[in-house]
Amino acid sequence: MSDVSATRSAVIELKDERRAMHEGYVFLDEKCLLLAGEILRELARYSRLQSEFLKLHDDALTALRVAVMRHGLHGLQIYPPADLSPARLRTEGRSLMGVRLQEATFEGGDAQAAGTVDRSPEAEVCRRAFAALLVAAAPIAAVSGNLERLSLEYRRAVRRARALQDVMLPELDQTIYEIDSRLEELEREDAIWMRQGASP
């Protein structure tokens, strides 16, 4: 039996609390649906970006093999790298149900290397292929972060919704039921006393 006083005002307060708790559960349930929908959209985007990245990765490996055949491993190792000083990682953020989501783009990472001595088309194709790979990696990284944050928030919302649905709301219902039962008993006792007091 709950230690809450068995009064009508206590029942009203508990029912108000239950109504607010139920509204919280409905909000969390809707939040879970929104987060799940966004997770599915981000997963589809991740799958598309990953396919593009893997194709670029294969192209870059092919270009690397061709460049190594032209220059040799040591010759390619001393080939000047692309100039990344003007490159910028640009991010744009948005929020969904308090979860920060980002989009990222890598710009300006294909600047030609300066001072190349033994320049060749094979080495330039290899440089451009790896620059394209770097550009493709930025949005994948942003989507991966989005999925981690969405997954964390989804699991947290599900735990809270289940706690409300499976623990707190049933406990509150039981408390309200017990108090209502106790009040009915008291009313019956009062009615019996009233009848006995009115008897001649």
Image: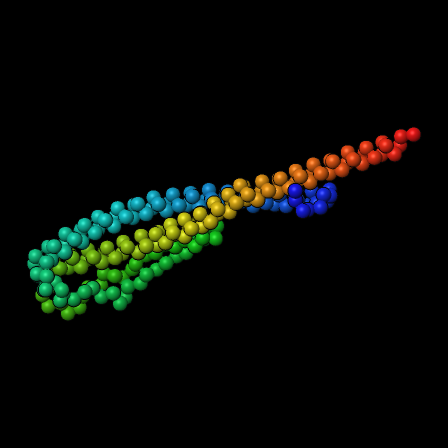
Q: Nearer the viewer, residue 113 or 30?
A: 30
- Depth check: give the residue in front, 97 or 151: 151
| Residue at the image position 80 percent from the left and 36 percent from the top | 190
**9 and 177: which one is in front?**
177
The image shows residue 20 at horizontal and vertical percentages of: 61, 45
Coloring scheme of the render? rainbow
Quadrant of the image containing the C terminus: top right
Instruction: Name the residue at 16% across, 53% down.
Output: 61
Quadrant placement of the N terminus? top right
161 or 42: nearer the viewer = 161
Residue in view at x 31 percent, y 52 percent: 140
Q: Residue at x 26, y 46 (%)?
A: 51
In this view, 192 is above or below 168 = above
Q: Quadrant of residue 44?
A: top left
- Asked whether the viewer can see residue 167, the reply is yes
Residue 187 in the figure: left or right of residue 141: right
Count of picture labels? 0
Q: Is residue 80 above or below residue 66?
A: below
Instruction: Spot the residue most to the top.
Output: 200
| Residue 19 visible in the picture | no
Q: Quadrant of residue 7?
A: top right
Residue 196: x and y in percent read 86, 32
Q: Position of residue 4 (x, y in %)?
A: 68, 46
* Direction bottom: furthest residue: 115
Residue at the outermost right position: 200
Q: Residue 81 location, x and y as percent? A: 18, 65
**Horizontal side, residue 196 vs residue 152: left or right:** right
Is 114 displayed left or right of 51 in the figure?
left
Q: Is residue 167 left or right of residue 176?
A: left
